[in-house]
Image (cartoon, coloured by chain):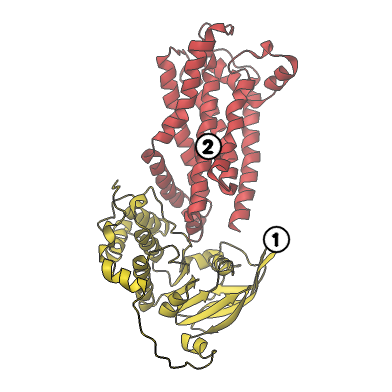
Amino acid sequence: MTKHFFGDTAALLGRSLRHVTRSVDTIVTTAITPIAMMLMFVYVFGGAIETGSDSYVNYMLPGILLITIASGIAYTAFRLFTDMKSGIFERFQSMPIARSSVLWAHVLTSLIANLLSLVVVVLVALLMGFRSAAGVLAWLGVAGILILFTLALTWIAVIPGLTAKSVDGASAFSYPLIFLPFLSSAFVPTDTMPGPVRAFADHQPVTSIVNTIRDLFTQQPVSTDIWIALAWCVGILIVAYVFAMNTYRRKIA
Amino acid sequence: MTAQNVIHVQGLEKSYKQLQVLRGVDFDVARGSIFALLGSNGAGKTTVVKILSTLLKADAGTASVNGLDVATHPANVRESISLTGQFAAVDEILSGRENLVLVARLRHLKDPGKIADDLLERFSLTDAGARKVSTYSGGMRRRLDIAMSLIGNPPVIFLDEPTTGLDPQARIEVWQAVKELAGRGTTVLLTTQYLDEAEQLADRIAILHEGRIIVNGTLTELKQLLPPAKVEYVEKQPTLEDVFLTLVGANGKNSHDRNAGTDA
């Protein structure tokens, strides 16, 4: 049945992309919270925050991008949850298709929908004065890290999507993820934080990812942060994938 | 199993944690017949259907479809079955036609567009074909659901409580569709909690109770289990269903417009 994997995934991807394009509000809703935060931080708090960077929007955009992804994957869980509840998931699983294509279609849809939201947020940031002299390679590096981060969080989202009992349960897991950038170097330099908070901020995944993206945008040579960032992304991706696949196998017997 | 038996179930057992749902279920279904599994809520009907459609593994016993064991050859079993689950498993955001095209593509058939158009026609959904399924009435959804199950002409179809939650008209529409299916030689395994549904449709009826089949036979055979019929004279009043169907038109001709207010 694996010979049909790509064809089946393409058919199912077409289906869930229609869900995205027919409810553009999900893209907008995903983008609107990070945009609101960006407005608030740049025009309200930003003036009082000493970052050592001449433009605060430049400083905080990497963190905002991660918040965008964290709120976007709530929809991934929601779409999967809806399929589970409506019985269409079982219909697909009882058909002669490559079974895993059902899950992969959701994962790829999550990736595409999140990239669209990211583009919207970056465009708004440009309007607000975000500027970067980064070249094509640096932008590709940023895109690569964001894609890896999206995939890692998407596989986390698959777990509540498969197991949640209610819509709220399916998306609640994303709240702590949205909050994580606040306890990192995303909005203020970590050396202003009290000891234990700083210790946490310095050693959680968001800080290394934010620092790497910031270095790429400002054309600084990337520090060892990039390896820590990649290790976190790949590590989370692998662990989440294993757990998600286990959950999936238990669900479909 | 004999050659005419397309579904063969023997000693099937299944528990969910402490709860023993199936305690040794045996039955056979002959090719081209309609077999009704009758039982109250929680009797285990859906569990049987899920095991037969390879969505659930049994704890003990064997089940085969078209001569293939569901536990050892699930992929081959899926080639010859179609499942219409308890809730109409249709994609609300796609149109009726897109739903059908999607299933035809997933069954790797040629010309999915033509298959979709033919089925829309056959199930009187042509006018609604381009509309989002979320605007369909319950009966239209169920018809689309059954139409999706027919794509690729699988020889065996499982219908899990196909008329639960439907109004009387929609119920009759579904019954007609099921009779037509069996008329074309498809084997239908139907679960229901409605006695009249089993009576209307099934060639054989099995009653599933507390995890076991307690009787299995034709309607005539089941009736013989009770004392012979007494003749009584009773004035026949029209039932409310008779009144309702007479007033609104029994054959569902008017059903296309129902709940169609929010055209997409």
**What shade has chain B been given?**
yellow
Q: Which residue is mark 1?
A: B17
Which residue corresponds to the image point at 34% horizontal and 67% vertical from the top-left?
A: B169
Crowd rating for badge 1 (residues with CA inside 10 Å; few <14, some 14–19, many 20+):
few
Q: Which chain corresponds to the colour red?
A: A
Amino acid type of the residue tagged 1 in the rendering: Lys
**Subunit bearing disc 2:** A
Residue under disc 2 on the same chain as residue under disc 1? no
Res B125 seen here: no
| Quadrant of residue B245 within the rendered picture | bottom left
Which residue corresponds to the image point at 43% horizontal and 12% vertical from the top-left?
A: A129
Amino acid type of the residue tagged 2 in the rendering: Ala
Which residue corresponds to the image point at 30% horizontal and 50% vertical from the top-left?
A: B131
**Badge 2 element:** helix
Q: Nearer the viewer, residue A136 or A66?
A: A66
**Subunit bearing disc 1:** B
Is A86 drawn above or below residue B176 in the view shown?
Answer: above
Q: Which residue is mark 2?
A: A74
Residue B170, horizontal then vertical, whole percent: 35, 65
Q: Nearer the viewer, residue B63 or B48?
A: B48
Tag count: 2
Residue B67, horizontal then vertical, whole percent: 53, 76
Residue B13, horizontal then vertical, whole percent: 66, 71
Res A9 seen here: yes
Q: Nearer the viewer, residue B11 or B43?
A: B43
